[in-house]
Amino acid sequence: MSGIVQDITLSTTILVDEDDVRITIPNRHIVGEIIHNSGAMSLVETHFVVCSNSNIQGALDDSLQAVQALEGLGNETRALFGVSQLSGLGVEITGRIWVPTAQYFYFKYAINQSLQDRLKQTGVELATPAQTIQFRQE
């Protein structure tokens, strides 16, 4: 359960989640529990693998531009893209983007869609596992 604290009374704490649902929690259930306070901004992480023959720097630049083009984020958004892993499949790129906590899932999905659209538009090919199937005739 997560949300932004809307009100705290003697007996309850009221959260509002991303879908604007009010969650009322009796304070007796909170006492002694671990509470994560993320503040106004939360971190979205995204990972994707591009073919190793791709223009990696171009893919990194395109990724940052795709995030900055999203309405509600803009050029001042703290976002970082980099090569996180090399594999036989390709080059894994990881993005770390700070988004408003109240709209975490909206931006998580919008970021992924924007990345997919931008990479397709610029011709960067996402790596996919290849399988060889052999048919034997007996």
Image: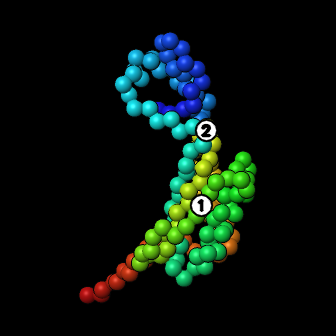
Q: Which mark is residue 80?
A: 1
Which kind of residue does numbered mark 1 sit on? Leu
**Height in image: 26 above or below 121?**
above
* Disc 1 crowd, CA 10 A, few/some/many (<14, 14-19, 20+): some
Q: Residue at x 55, y 51 (%)?
A: 44
The x and y percentages for residue 101 are: 59, 40
Q: Which residue is mark 2?
A: 40
Looking at the image, the residue that sits furthest to the left is 138
Q: Residue at x 59, y 54 (%)?
A: 97
Q: Residue at x 59, y 35 (%)?
A: 18
Q: Quadrant of the C terminus?
A: bottom left
Residue 127 visible in the picture? no
Q: Which of 48/60 is in front?
A: 60
The x and y percentages for residue 64 are: 65, 63
The x and y percentages for residue 67 are: 66, 58
**Height in image: 102 above or below 93?**
above
Closer to the chain start, of discs 2 and 1, is 2
Q: CA distance from mark 2 to mark 1?
A: 19 Å
Q: Which of 135/114 is in front?
A: 114
- Where disc 1 sits, the SS reads strand
Q: Which mark is residue 115?
A: none
* Residue 14, quarter of picture: top right
